[in-house]
Image (cartoon, grey):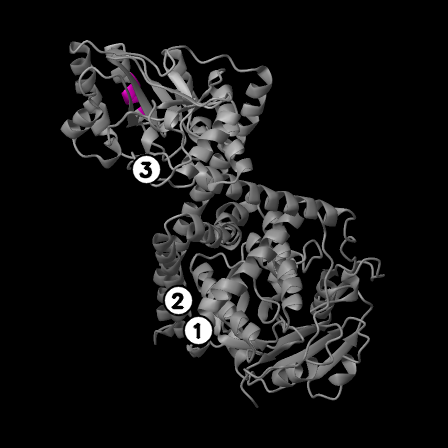
Amino acid sequence: MDHPAHRPGHPAAGPRALPVGLRAVTVYGAPPPPPRKGGGPLRAIFALAALLLIATVVLVEVYTGARFSPDGTNPRSTTDNDVPAAVRDGGPMIDLTGQTPRSSRLPARTVALTFDDGPDPIWTPRILDVLARHHVPATFFVIGSQVARNPELARRITAEGHEIGAHTFTHPDLASLPAWRRTLENSQAQLAIAYATGRGTALVRPPYSSVADALTDKDYATVRSVGAQGYLTVLDDLDSEDWRRPGVDRIVKNATPPGDRGAIVLFHDAGGDRAQTVAALDRLIPALQQRGYRFRTVTGTPNPRAGTVEMWRGGALVWTVRGADAILRLLWVLLIVAGGLIVVRTLILFVFARAHARRRRASTWSWGPPVRDPVTIVVPAYNEAATIRPAVESMTRSTYPDVSILVVDDESTDGTADAVRDLDRVRVVRVPSGGKATALNTGVALSHDELVVMVDADTVLTPDAIERLVQPFADPKIGAVAGNVKVGNRRRLLGKWQHIEYVIGFNLDRRLYDTFGCIPTVPGALGAFRRAALVEAGGLSNDTLAEDTDLTCAIQQAGWRVVYEETAIAYTEAPATARQLWRQRYRWSYGTMQALWKHRRGHFGRTRIPFIALFSVVLPLLAPLIDLMAVYGLFFLDRKITIIGWLAMLVVQALTAVMAFRLDHESLRPLWTLPLQQVVYRQVMYAVLLASALAALTGRRLGWQKIRRTGDFSAAPSG
């Protein structure tokens, strides 16, 4: 319900005290401070920065985390004719930096061990250990993105006298890329190497290349473009085929040059389990040394020093990759936390909510002696002409023997008060505009009964709702009772989704919170209060936008119990449009955060609010990661596992929904919309909560927004 005092600049009644019997209740007439200027642009900046950060992380991770298969020797080319004979029939080192193609090979009894696809944090150190043990140098053709993630290994490679060459930045098939992308792949790999080692390199081994006579015309075009960038292309003479993991004997045989021929031998230090490679090297190196072979790097010279500019640029590139990796790891951790919280919440709900329902349904259950004390229903109203008459008429049909109805018209302009003046047992009071909290405080002050029920002007009660709602007051320790509020307008899809949310997210959770003695909200649509609890809590306050949550927490801070009575049923009109829904939930979410923060101290704040915040704020804030990472995984990870994981979460939601509907005696028919609700409605609620959190972080105050009512209570029982 919305009031003019919640709009910036509207005059409101000042604070005043009204007598209540021999006591006084302060009526807080001052409106909340006006919205703070500048919060909107700041929130927009935060939101834009968050979106840009997420987009950057996704792009970097997709770019640098592409899957690839290991390099292997391709069969000899027999149909392409653009490859010059000097290259096709020459050696594996191809120099196209000048006008004339040149190729060369190693001298006899000379071997250059080369390793592709690293550095890898597991296998590269083990291979380096083997090389160090045998005092053998080698050449490592590294992937730039892996250097960015493991710079210390690249430094170790050069520090131990080995040579580094570039194997592109992300291991794509260069022959299939446009010229600008080929240049980018090699230059980024160069920058990563420069930052990690302080060295440059003139060597490039294109991914998926092999021996010179296997070059196709397309491959040769790539070699030419690499040469035009000033690089020496290095292929291989022998492929150990360690990427197949054929066994140590086969790897040693494949890597052994025939006769006395020199050879550049291809191995891999990444891309999978390289235990066979490590074992094969320990056998191959001594065997070749016994045959008189010597080992050298491809060029036989150390890598040249990199320039300062290249090292600075490389640092920016490396830290971008590492930053994106760190954020993605954090997102995965938060995803695991969110998934764990969902599972824990589901288990707790199944155990405690079901136990709560069974206990209440037991034949021996009773709140105590029947309560028959007089009750005043306070109905605050502002421009509710469309809904207030059916709402108040439902109250007049109450089966409770002693009930009076007080409508507090907060200076409405649409004839709200006139709509109910003629009804029996109804008293209408028109007050200067002061907001909902002020209207409720005024109603409490003008009533004379010890039990006060607060009902929104857009809510229809069942005939026995009041009688059932006040029975818990048989226990003198109970200060407030939350009713069971359901969606009355659920004929349309949006109404059905909100109905599901009310049954699962509100009413089922209240059973859980009731069990643990920490109900966060007695709903404004239907709640009962003991006058003494209201007085001790200080009445309703304008400190937050969720005055019902604020009051509920204050009552429990004062030492009173708050309970849930699921048999006291009311039907409220939920927002009928997406815009209205956004505005309402935005206010609810923001106000709840305000109230929880306000009451964070004291016994209730220290012992109960962390539990409430965990499942009502933290979990909803983390839950979007499930869908976000599902989309990421659908496109860039194992699609089958991603779909199975997301469907598993949907099954958990479905089981929870079925239990909630059964406990609430609701038809399961609306649950056919649950999958669509998870895809569409849930995302909107995520956005609302995130927007509210941003508003809270930026310190922006929100005004109340008027929601247009239609008077649709089609789901409420007639009569």
Of the two numbered discs 2 and 1 on the same chain, state the one appearing first in sequence. 2
Q: Using the numbered discs, state the Cα–Cα distance from disc 2 to disc 3 in whole angstroms.
A: 58 Å
Instruction: Name the amino acid, label 3.
Output: Ser
Instruction: Name the amino acid, label 1.
Output: Leu
Query: Dot 1, crowdedness within 10 Å: few (<14), some or many (≥20)?
Result: some
Nearer the observer, 608 or 230 = 230
Of the two numbered discs 1 and 3 on the same chain, state the one appearing first in sequence. 3
Q: Using the numbered discs, state the Cα–Cα distance from disc 2 to disc 1 in whole angstroms.
A: 8 Å
Give the labeled residue for mark 2. Answer: 654
Q: Main secondary structure of the magenta part?
A: helix
Query: Dot 3, crowdedness within 10 Å: few (<14), some or many (≥20)?
Result: some
Nearer the observer, 605 or 313 = 313
Where is residue 540? Give x, y as percent: 68, 60
Where is residue 314? Give x, y as percent: 54, 24
Q: Which residues are magenta?
A: 124-128
Residue at the image position 42 percent from the left and 17 percent from the top: 155
Verify CB contact (< 8 Å) between mark 2 and mark 1.
yes
Residue 389 located within the stretch drawn in magenta: no
Give the labeled residue for mark 1. Answer: 671
Give the labeled residue for mark 3. Answer: 77
